[in-house]
Image (cartoon, helix red, strand yellow):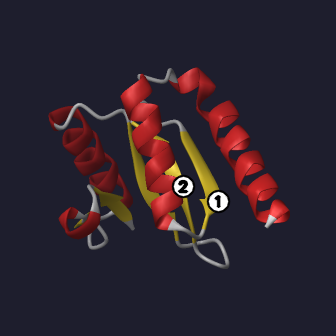
Amino acid sequence: LVYHGKGENLVEFSRLSPKSIRNEERAYMRNNHKTYCVFLDVASHPQMYGIRGTNGICVGRISTDFQEVNRLAECCNSAGLSPVHLADVVEAGRFALDHRAGSE
């Protein structure tokens, strides 16, 4: 499943083939000036969200919390993050979440 947007404005491309999903993702992100979107990795257990870029770069299994992953994707979009740095930013985000959870 691939989701775009925020809150009630989520668009789900679950009924499409994988190739069609990628084409729809690219069109959506291009039309909305986005580089990164959130996707649901249904192959992972528990199911987790990841971030996919327009260039095909993908980092999966980030978190089970859609909102956390969406905030990270939006930050990457706002900052104009280069795809080269996506994995490093995701890893830093995971570290921050783990550290914050450990201090509570």
Question: What residue is rendered at 29% in x and 47% in y?
Answer: 25
Q: Is residue 3 left or right of residue 32?
A: right
Q: Which mark is residue 61?
A: 1
Mark 1: secondary structure: strand
Q: Looking at this rendering, what residue extends furthest in the right direction?
A: 102
Question: What residue is rendered at 37% in x and 30% in y?
Answer: 78
How far apart in space, not on screen, are marks 2 and 1 (Cα)?
5 Å
Establish if 90 lies above or below 104.
Answer: above
Q: Looking at this rendering, what residue extends furthest in the front direction?
A: 104
Q: Is residue 13 left or right of residue 31?
A: right
Q: Quadrant of residue 18?
A: bottom left
Numbered marks: total: 2
Q: Are marks 2 and 1 in contact (CB under 8 Å)?
A: yes
- Tag 2 residue: 50
Of residues 16 and 2, which is closer to you in this image? 2
Q: Is residue 16 left or right of residue 96?
A: left
Q: Position of residue 21 (x, y in %)?
A: 31, 56
Three-letter code for the amino acid on which mark 2 is drawn: Gly
Question: What residue is rendered at 44% in x and 58% in y?
Answer: 39
Q: Residues within 10 Å of mark 2 (few under 14, many from 20)?
A: many
Of residues 102 and 36, which is closer to you in this image? 102
Q: Position of residue 33 (x, y in %)?
A: 23, 31
Question: What residue is rendered at 52% in x and 36% in y?
Answer: 57
Establish if 45 lies above or below 40.
Answer: below
Q: Position of residue 32 (x, y in %)?
A: 19, 37
Three-letter code for the amino acid on which mark 1 is drawn: Arg
Q: Is residue 60 left or right of residue 16?
A: right
Q: Position of residue 16 (x, y in %)?
A: 27, 66
Label 2 vs 1, first from the N-terminus: 2
